């Protein structure tokens, strides 16, 4: 398990490489919800998502010998971009395995950062065996998107920033995919202020962490489609799940319709462009299925959206 000291060390390590993203108050959405709503804007982070925090922390911790060998990862998008960018900045060769269905803009970004991109399969999970095969063949360092304490500690720096910027926070809502972000953020938040509620939010079509949380053991689910593609997964990682069980107060799910409405509201009311995975946090708060405090922070995990899907969502959920 990671601890507060690990996250503070990560904060010092990555400080010159990532943004300290703003915490933005929304008066309009607060009026709608009947409670203060703040957004932690990781959509404004380097590479457009929180993933840059973990990628830099992990890769800055590599030895010179490891850096000389190069790195490899698999991802449907945001982790791939983060690893590709960090590798470019640090002068490390990177191989990235992505599914053929990955958002074209994310593929182009990875290539633009200089990574060797290989497309394989329909999901990130399909690309995983190929990444491991490449790792063994080329003697590379594997950078896991979730099951790595360096990655989790880096992601946890977002939680530290939340508590530094809003010490009297009542609740923090976090998007959950594999559980790495949730483990990092919840560890930081609970270490600084144990009474703050930490609430994980998933699409109901991809609720592997919530199902595991309810069962108190890792539970594999059947993958189904969700517009929140960045939260895809059929089971949480073992290391991440340990952190979730220790520090998370509630896990809730939201429907595709709720995600679409929350996404549209955020973009119209705050003028910030986000991806559907980010919108689950506001959707969870507005659903009234979880604790709502006086001051609530919704973490926006990223802004790397498929424009075709976004256009379809806007056409169905116009705000007058």
Image (cartoon, rainbow, N blue to C red):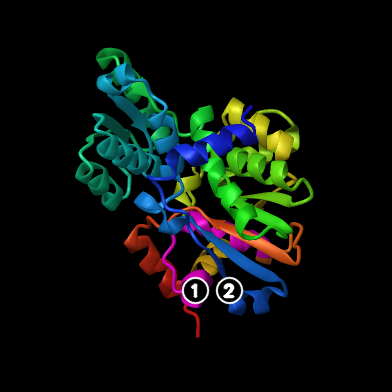
Tell whether label 2 touches label 1 (CB within 8 Å).
yes
Quarter occupied by residue 60: top left
Place of residue 89 in the rendered image (x, y in percent of width and height, measured from the top left): 27, 40
Image point 64% across, 68% down: which residue?
A: 37
Q: Is residue 133 visible in the rendered structure shown here?
A: no
Residue 166 or residue 84, whichever sits in front: 166
Label 1 SS: helix
N-term-proximal mark, 1 vs 2: 2
- Image: magenta residue range: 265-285
Q: Does the stretch in magenta take in 275? A: yes
The circle drawn on residue 270 is 1
Q: In this view, does 57 lie to the left or right of 298?
A: left
In this rendering, would 47 be left or right of 33? left
Crowding around mark 2 (Cα neighbors within 10 Å: few <14, some 14 to 19, many 20+) is: some
Quickly name the residue at label 2.
26
Q: Nearer the viewer, residue 277 or 126?
A: 277
Residue 238 position (above or below residue 152) = above
């Amino acid at each position: 398990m990671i601890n507060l000291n690990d996250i503070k060390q990560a904060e010092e390590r990555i400080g010159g490489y990532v943004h300290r993203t703003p915490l933005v108050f929304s008066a309009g959405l607060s009026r709608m919800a009947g409670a203060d709503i703040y957004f932690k804007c990781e959509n404004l982070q380097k590479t457009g998502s929180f993933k840059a925090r973990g990628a830099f922390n992990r890769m800055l911790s590599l030895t010179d010998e490891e850096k000389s060998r190069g790195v490899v990862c698999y991802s449907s998008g945001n982790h791939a971009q983060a690893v590709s960018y960090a590798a470019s900045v640090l002068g490390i060769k990177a191989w990235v395995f992505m599914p053929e269905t990955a958002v074209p803009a994310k593929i182009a970004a990875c290539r633009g950062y200089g990574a060797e991109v290989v497309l394989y399969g329909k999901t990130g999970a399909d690309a995983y065996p190929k990444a491991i095969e490449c790792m063994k063949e080329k003697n590379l360092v594997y950078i896991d998107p979730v099951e790595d304490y360096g990655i989790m500690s880096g992601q946890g720096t977002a939680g530290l920033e939340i508590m530094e910027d809003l010490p009297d926070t009542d609740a923090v809502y976090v998007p959950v995919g594999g559980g790495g972000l949730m483990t990092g953020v919840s560890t930081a938040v609970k270490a600084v202020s144990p009474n703050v509620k930490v609430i994980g939010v998933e699409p109901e079509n991809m609720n592997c962490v919530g199902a595991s949380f309810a069962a108190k053991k890792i539970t594999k689910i059947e993958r189904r489609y969700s517009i929140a593609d960045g939260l895809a997964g059929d089971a949480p990682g073992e290391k991440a799940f340990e952190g979730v069980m220790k520090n998370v107060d509630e896990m809730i799910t939201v429907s595709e319709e709720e995600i679409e409405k929350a996404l549209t509201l955020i973009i119209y009311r705050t003028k910030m462009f986000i991806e559907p995975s980010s919108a689950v946090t506001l959707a969870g708060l507005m659903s009234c299925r979880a604790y709502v405090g006086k001051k609530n922070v919704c973490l926006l995990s990223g802004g790397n959206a498929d424009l075709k899907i976004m256009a379809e969502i806007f056409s169905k959920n116009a705000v007058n």
